[in-house]
Each structure stands twice: as C-alpha cells, then as structure tokens.
Amino acid sequence: MSDSFSQIASSLVSTARSFHSRGWLLGTSGNLSAVVNRDPLHLAMSASGVDKGELTETQIVLIDEQARMVNNHSGKPSDESPLHVKIVRELGVGSVLHTHSIWNTLLSELYASDGGVIIEGYEMLKGLRGVTTHQHREWLPIIENSQDMLALAEQVGDTLNEHKQSHGFLLRNHGLYSWGNNLAEAKRHIEILEFLLETLGRKLTIERNS
C-alpha cells in the first residue's frame, strides 16, 4: 500500500475519532472518504459496520469509481460508497464526510417539506469555502433517504447540479454530507455546518418555549 494511502488512512481515523467524541458519529454511523488517486479514481474510505470511535487504519478500505474494493482487505465497503463517488466525480472534491448528529437528523425531518434548510446571518458561515460575509445565505437541500444507493446517488448528483453553491446536503432522517478540496477543508465544513445546525435547532427550541 502506498505511503499516500497510509497517510490518508491515518487522517481519516483521526477525523472519525474527533467526530465521535462530539457525538456526530456514534456507534457504526457515518462514513468518511478521501481521494488517493484521480486517474484511475481511488478513494480511501471507512469500512462498513465499524465503530468510528474505535476506528483503526486497518479498517480503511480502498475503492474504485464503481465502489469496488481495490486492496486485498477483509472489510466491506460502506453501502453509501456510491454517494461518495458521485460527489467526488460531480464536484471534483478531494474528500467527503458524512455525520449522524442529533441536530442534523432532527432538522432534516423538521424542514423536509421545505426541501432544505436556510442558514444566514451567522459569522461562522465565513468558515465555508468562498464565503466572505455573515450575510451569506446557505441553502442545505434535503433529499429523501433510500436504501437503493445507486438511485440515491443519481438523486444526489441531480441535487448537486441544481444547487452548485451549497456546501452540503441532508438526507432526511439520516444525516449530513459535506465535502472539501481536501480532508482538512471537508472537516472544517462539517464542523461549521454542525455548529450552525445546532445553533438553529437550539434557537427554534428557545423560541417555541418562550
């Protein structure tokens, strides 16, 4: 296995454990990936069914653009691998991260009928790539969840093409997806969006109880 794969695997493990400690990847939920090669496309990705709080480098698999295993590994690629591949191919990004926090799950249901969540007016928005003012209006589309991952990947592709300025999307009653040009940027985007979603959720709770 290449040095670049080993380095990326180590970084994915560190990110997974960080997210687990914040309650965003409890149990076996969520998945993380990063590009190892562009041509042919290879992604390093957390294997299916592994505890993200105890993730190790040996539980990072290498998949191709058909979400098939490339390395000789006993693990199984995540069922959501096609979504990661679709995002990488559509946007040309270097990393895709998927979290299952309480707030992103609740808000994905609360705003499902609106088709997405609007977040604006917060200074933290400036942590998103290309955003230079708190007056930015971030739209996080909400996509209906499905167990048909190939069909869901096509829906994700359509959504990405329709909302090119969005930095992420929500799967209804499932969780948040975000990405970046590299793993560090993807991690930052998740942290920013999770902060903003929790802020929005807590604000709604206060308003309804006042």
Image (cartoon, helix red, strand yellow):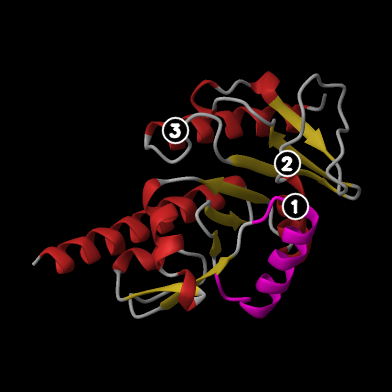
Secondary structure, mark 1, is helix
Q: Are marks 1 and 2 in contact (CB under 8 Å)?
A: yes
The residue positioned 57% from the left and 23% from the top of the image is 55
Numbered range of the magenta stretch: 146-166
Q: Are marks 3 and 2 in contact (CB under 8 Å)?
A: no
Which residue position is annotated with label 2?
79
Which residue position is annotated with label 1?
149
Q: Amino acid at mark 1?
A: Met
Q: Is residue 94 above or below residue 1?
A: below
Q: Amino acid at mark 2?
A: Asp
- Is residue 34 in view from this perspective? yes
Secondary structure, mark 2, is loop
The residue positioned 86% from the left and 33% from the top of the image is 69
Residue 85 position within the rendered picture, expressed as x and y whole percent measured from the top left: 77, 52
- Quadrant housing the C terminus: bottom left
Q: Is residue 53 left or right of residue 83?
A: left
Q: Is residue 208 above or below residue 18?
A: below
Residue 75 position within the rendered picture, expressed as x and y whole percent measured from the top left: 76, 23
Q: Is residue 122 above or below residue 186?
A: below
Few, some or many residues within 10 Å of mark 3 (<14, 14–19, 20+): many
Mark nearest the camera among 3 and 2 is: 2
Number of callouts in the render? Answer: 3
Residue 137 position within the rendered picture, expressed as x and y whole percent measured from the top left: 41, 79
CA–CA distance between discs 3 and 2?
20 Å
CA–CA distance between discs 1 and 2?
7 Å
Which residue position is annotated with label 3?
20
Q: Is residue 23 left or right of residue 121?
A: right
Q: Main secondary structure of the magenta part?
A: helix
Which is nearer the N-term, disc 3 or disc 2? 3
